[in-house]
Every structure is written in C-alpha cells, then in structure tokens.
Image (cartoon, rainbow, N blue to C red):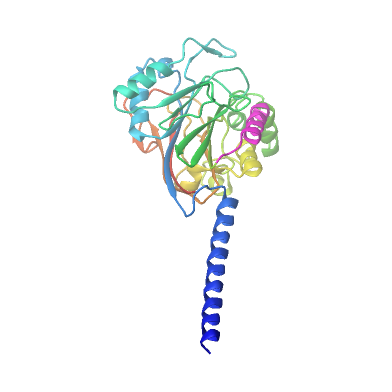
Amino acid sequence: MEKARRRNVLITVIRSVVVVVLLWLCVAVFVGDAGVDVVGAERVNVTVMSFNIYGGGAQRGVPLSRTVAAIRAVQPDIVGLQETRQEGPPPDYPPVGPWVTADLVLELKNAGSAYYAYNQEGNNSALWANTILSRYPIQLSDNGDVIHSPNNLGIRVRISDHVTVAVYNIHLASDPYQPYQVMRYTEPYLYTPQQAIQSAIDTRGNGTNLLLSDVTAFGKSDIAFVFGDFNEPSHRDWTAPAVRAGLQPWIVQWPTTLTMENAHSFSDLYRLGWPDVVSRPGFSWTSMPQTPVHYDRIDMMLGWARGQMEVTRAGIVGEKAPEADIVIRDFPSDHRAMFATVSISV
C-alpha cells in the first residue's frame, strides 16, 4: 500500500515537471518567433522628428540657433533632417556649400541636447543633403565605419541592449509638383486623379524604388522609421472627408505613402495619432507666404514595429498657431517640422 502511494506521488511530481517544461518551451517559442531576445513584454517610448531645415535657416537669412530652438522644443530621440546644405542655382537647385551638421550638433550640445550625427552623403534620387541625428549610438562596423543601407538611405541605432531601430531618411524630387498641377497653378495641368498618380510615379518612382530596395536589403530590425521631405501628400489625406470639407479637390491615392504601407506595412505616424484629417489636416507646406498656394502635408514620419505600436503624441513645429502646435519665433524653414512620440511593445 505504501509503495503504491509513493509511486502515485512520484507520478504526480513527474507530470508537474513535464507541464512546467512544456510551458517554458511555449514561452521560448513565442518569444523567438517575435524576434525579441528577452522573455516577457517591454515597452519603449521614442520621440521622432522629420525636419527640412532649409540650409539650417540660411536660405531665409535666419541664424542656426532657430533650428536648434525648433529641435529642442520637441526633445526628439531620433531626427531625420533634409536640406542640411544650401540650395544652388536654378533650374536644378543642387546642394552647395558646407553641411551645417557639425555646427548644429555643437550648438545642440552647448544647449544641453547631445546627439550622434550621420551625414547621408551621395547623389541619388532619394537624397538631398540628408542627416540623421540620434540620442542613441549609431551602429558601427568593426572598422568604426557607420553601417548603412546600400543606397545610404538608412542606418541602425541601438536604443537598448536588445532593441535596434532601422532609421531611413529621404528627400524626393520636388518638380513637377502634382498638387499645384491639379490646382492649375503650374503647367502641365492634371485633369484626373489617375493623371496625378502617374505623374507622381514618374517624378518620384526612382527615389521610392531606392527606398524599397534599401528596406528589403537592410531590413527593419525591431523598429523602423522612415522620415523625409516626400514632396508628395499622403494617400491618408486626400480622402472623401477632406474633399467634402474643401481641404482637397480630389480623392487621390498618392503612391509613395501607399507603396510603403502596402509593401512594408509602414504606418503614417501623424495620421495614426490624428485619424481625423478634417480636424487635424497637419499642413507642413508651407510656413512662408506664397501666392498662389495650396497647403498640404508633404513631410512624413512612417513607422513599423514587430510589436504593438501606439502614437501617444503627434504635432507640428512652425511659425504660428493654429497651424503649429509648437511655435518658434523666426522659424527657419519653408517646411514645418513634424514630430511624434511612439510607444512600442518589443
């Protein structure tokens, strides 16, 4: 009788151990599939910013300190900057003169905001004197060189021991500018949404393809962001509600944001934070008086994550309210800056 009782106890213990081991294996398999190298959930909060700085304000005769003020007003962790050199002569307006990056980083540091910086040098249809700033270390090779994507559109930064972020930053072609063609401001005029889409593909397709190629080759790590002066609206903005409200003339599935959403599951962070395009159109173009003008959001922040991603704050930095959530005196650029805080489970 006693032997039978001990045998039953032993069987119960063995069954308990097997259950515990199986549960541990289930957790390990789940975590491995998610691409996370720790057991259990963790949330990271990252504030990002996209800002065409217009030569650091030099194009407007504004000191670099105003660009510093705009960045520090947001206190971003990662920033995609475009036009960190001045514009050359028409008709091509090539980048000329020195990069303002070193002076900008020094002024930011002296003001209490330290950043790593990477100038995306090169000449292709998705670059125009772009720079990435990061509070987090930029990933380097064994030789000490920055590891970047094949077309130099992206780098990686490590925000913790086990979370890496792929950061892409682009500047796409500005001309021809389809919204002005749709509005009959500039020729050749566009008469249908399909004409607008095709013209946008003809204008920026090469640059978009470089980005797609880089994301495919370089990857999205645990988190990925795309920043940039797209010079093209979001397909999330030219919608039926926007047309009914008189904000836009047509419904247009603008191809660049749509392609990034469909091909790589990127989300439009500003529109994720503010889904109602009528109450928060988020115009980033333009902060300067122009006649004629059609206001639009052409400066983008796209995001992707392995885990759940939530935008807890999104807004605009610019020259005046209500167009801007954060107002900077002597705003330095012709583009307003976009920012968002993202909470991500990893």
Looking at the image, residue 39 sits to the left or right of residue 199; the answer is left
Looking at the image, residue 96 sits to the left or right of residue 188; the answer is left
Farthest residue to the left: give it. 111
x, y (%) of residue 198? 70, 33
Name the residue rendered at 61%, 37% in the picture: 219
Farthest residue to the bottom: give it. 1
Q: Is residue 243 depicted above or below 121 in this figure? A: below
Marker count (numbered):
0
Q: Is residue 293 visible?
A: yes
Q: 93 or 32: which is nearer to us?
A: 32
x, y (%) of residue 288? 43, 25
Residue 216 magenta-drawn?
A: yes
x, y (%) of residue 43? 43, 49
Q: Which range of residues does the magenta coloring cover?
A: 204-221
Q: 137 or 24: which is nearer to us?
A: 24
Residue 214 falls in image quadrant: top right
**Secondary structure predominantly adopted by residues drawn in magenta:** helix
Looking at the image, residue 157 sits to the left or right of residue 328; the answer is right
Residue 232 magenta-drawn?
A: no
x, y (%) of residue 16? 52, 72
